Amino acid sequence: MNNRIKKATTHIVQNEGLLFEESRTGRIGYAIPKLDVPEQADLLDKKFVRDDGLEGMPELSEVDVIRHFTRLSTWNYGVDTGMYPLGSCTMKYNPRINEKLARLEGIANLHPLTPDAYAQGAIEIIRHLEEALAQITGLAAVTLQPAAGAQGELTGIMMIRACLTARGNPRKKVLIPDSAHGTNPASAIICGYTVETVPSTNEGVTDLAALRAMMNEDVAALMLTNPNTLGKFEENIIEVCRIMHEGGGLVYMDGANMNALVGVARPGDFGIDVMHMNLHKTFSTPHGGGGPGAGPVAVTAELEPYLPFPRVERGADNKLFFNFDRPQSVGRLRAFHGNFGVLVRALSYILTHGDTGLREATETAVLNANYIAHHLQDTYEIAYPGALMHEVVFSDKYQLKHGIKNVDIAKRLIDYGFYPPTMSFPLIVHGALMVEPTETESREELDLFIDAMRSINQEAAEDADLLKQAPHTTKVGRLDEVGAARKPILRWKPDPKADSAGSKR
Ligand SMILES: *Cc1c(COP(=O)(O)O)cnc(C)c1O
């Protein structure tokens, strides 16, 4: 048995230890000072006081609570646990220096409504990050407001509509390649455009002939991911931009895959007009389960007037301030100034690496993906072989003859101590397994992953059921993921039948 499996098996914790079930009347985990005011002080009108008081709250000691949450943390998997090759999502390590800086008291406790004059340092952080991202992308200006890549796309398409409207015609359609992320068509449609799909060539890049044939005066923009979600650099990108611009359209770049370009190539030089980046991917800020992210948008000088307001500017007194007087702006996309703590972390990442460090990270990310592709190409089909950037899309084609699908391979990887790759995306690859190791992983960890993938291929031939039942080493097995998304249970409720001693019901 592989060492990784042994290790994972010993980590299974049997005890559920639910907080509420462990509650015992009168058990406390706190000490508060003796009351030094009259006890009956009626501070609140009775009608505002819940008559159930604290009923239903668990009563526990401090160690009960610590053990509960520590135990829960061992049932989860994160990039601090091991390799997290979730393609397209760039799950890289979150350096602790970012956390330290984001927690500095003057940064963490600054009120978002602090007058500009007293928040010069924080505004400087915003200005500095905008400038760094403008340099990295080769574009003229950046907004940090959007809270995610998807919101960045929305912001970008709103600006494209505003720009084309100012030119005289907002146009009707947005072209999107068949390998695109689902948020691309969603953003275009929310902005009132219809979507047409551009096919990919057999090499996995945008089909130029098809693009030329589709371009006409109804087309507002092309939304292109580069490198695309097949891990391919769109080598005709300059020609793609020329076709769009000659036809009077604009080019939006989905920059989710910037981890393959930072410090090496600048989208502004390709001819891109608008793009977003995902700070929680490329710039090492935590993804957090649906928690704060950031999707800054960079634009050319022509689109700058349409950026969301307020904009950071420097006044005649040399002080920074937020300018709200932006008549052509598409408006405000988010309260205050974006997810500020995330912005601090991203700037910390950029400054601690510097230009050569960022370039090295990019080169290592590309090298790591190609290393995995090279060592697994005989074991797993690579849907679009040839030069790759930062990720590799395998398929389950060779394993299907044993009845093994991508999901079985992905779930079995958990038993080997790895988070599963992205599955069934991009949609044009049947049974896709999209692996993005990032620069985080050492050669030793990559070799363990390659070994695990090879063992799983062998298991597919010898013991297909083992894979179909996987994972075997986790607290729970295969989950109803659709059910969890559609009918989420977000709150613990007491089980009326359970008779847990002492717990107040
Ligand atoms: C992650 C991703 C997005 C969406 O970004 P969020 O920050 O998750 O909203 C869009 N396109 C691609 C290619 C992505 O990988």
Image: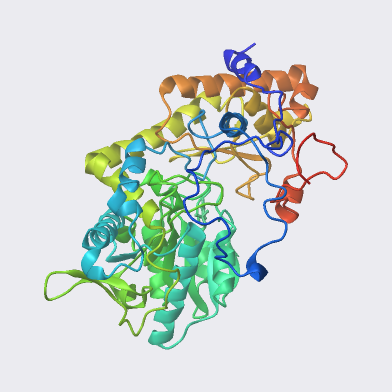
In what quadrant of the picture does the N terminus appear? top right
- Residue found at the very far left of the displayed protein: 317
Name the residue nearer the viewer: 241 or 293.
293
Vertical relation: 254 (above or below) 322: above
Q: Is residue 76 visible?
A: no
Question: Where is residue 384 shown, x and y percent of the image?
Answer: 55, 41
- Which quadrant of the figure has residue 332? bottom left
500 horizontally vs 391: left or right: right
- Residue found at the very far bottom of the displayed protein: 168
Question: Where is residue 219 shown, x and y percent of the image?
Answer: 51, 76
Please give the count of numbered marks on the rendered protein. Answer: 0
- Which quadrant of the figure has residue 394? top right
- Which quadrant of the figure has residue 13? top right
Question: Where is residue 404 shown, x and y percent of the image?
Answer: 75, 30
Question: Where is residue 31 shown, x and y percent of the image?
Answer: 51, 38
Q: Is residue 394 visible?
A: yes
